Image (tube, rainbow, N blue to C red):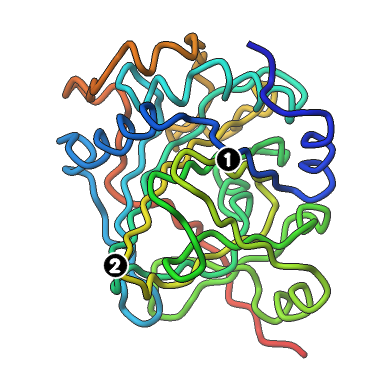
Amino acid sequence: MPSVLTPDQVDQFHRDGLVVVRGLFDAEETALLRRAMEVDPAIRGHIIDRLDAQGAATKIALWNRAGDSVYGLAARCERVVDTAEQLLGGPVYHYQSKLTAKEPRVGGAWEWHQDYGYWYHNGCLRPDMLSFQLALDKSFLENGCLELVKGSHHLGRIDHVPVPGEAQVVADPARMKHITARNEVIPAELEAGDVVIFHCNTLHRSAQNRSEHRRWTFLFCYNRVDNDTVIKDDDRYYVKLEKVPDSAIKAAGLKLADGRDNEHFTSKPFVPKVAEKADAD
């Protein structure tokens, strides 16, 4: 199947660093993926609480291979992979997947960052990488939807610095105040089944969930094959991606991981070691 994007949407991705695709997964597919995330023992057994500066937690699960579960098939289906290959200009492989679960009233925030601010340290020499974020629930500002800085991928990789007392690094706050003053921040408000595709250098964040509505999202990320990692100890190096037809999702039904860890679930998020940076006006 060719890319799902129109020429205008392709242009928007390259201009803005992001594009929203409405209804990329239909209601039946989205319900299967949502339920799999809720009940799969492999996912539930690898949930990590990622605290923000106020102590609120986002629950995450991360895995590095797209297997034969219904969510692995979603990350390998033609409509997704062909679109990623069109946007990145060449063959891709699955880099990682992630569940992010913000529960009502207690879901934590993510500070401003670029994915390539992390992935650079995994040995990816070029930012030929992108992510799909699928809304499993309705995602809006009040429940902590993704917010992205329009066109920020054109700025290149921004220095990332540690947040005191937290196991995360963030885009240099002294620089971010100038970036957000000059560039529009776009909230990715999505209905279940919608997807936002964004470049690995697009700056993004999400606020705490202060609403009565949970916000669960499924992210699947891709790297161009010829940008394979030069570091091989991180488990996100090239493994051939076997595409499946779009019909494979419904055909699989509620197929969960088989318990043999073909997905390579991780026990903790990767946090690069970066130096402190002094504040500047």
Using the rendered view, name the quadrant where residue 158 is placed. bottom right
Comparing labels 2 and 1, the label whose residue is closer to the camera? 2
Above or below for 110 versus 1: below
Q: Helix, strand, or loop for circle 2?
A: loop
Percent x, y of residue 87? 74, 30
Q: Residue at x 57, y 25 (%)?
A: 80
188 left or right of 201 in image: left
Quadrant of the snapshot with the N terminus: top right
Judged from this view, the residue extending furthest toward the front is 27
Which residue is disc 2 drawn over?
104
Residue at 45% x, 71% y is 142
Left or right of 3? Residue 189 is left
Q: Nearer the viewer, residue 167 or 105?
A: 105
Q: Which mark is residue 131?
A: 1
Dot 2 alpha-carbon crowd within 10 angstroms: few under 14, some 14 to 19, many 20 or more: some
Can you say whether 137 is above or below 155 in the image? above
Labelled disc at residue 281: none
Between disc 2 and disc 1, whose residue precedes? 2
* Count of labels in the image: 2
Q: Residue at x 15, y 36 (%)?
A: 41
Rendered location of residue 152, percent (x, y): 77, 59
Above or below — where is 22 with respect to 189? above
Name the residue at 22% across, 44% down.
46
Q: Secondary structure at mark 1?
A: strand
Cα distance in 3D space between marks 2 and 1: 25 Å
Quadrant assignment for the C terminus: bottom right
Position of residue 130 measured from the top left corner of the image (x, y, whole percent): 63, 39
User: Three-letter amino acid code at disc 2?
Assistant: Pro
* Nearer to us in this view, 50 or 15: 15
Q: Amino acid at mark 1?
A: Ser
Residue 226, x across and y down, in percent: 69, 22
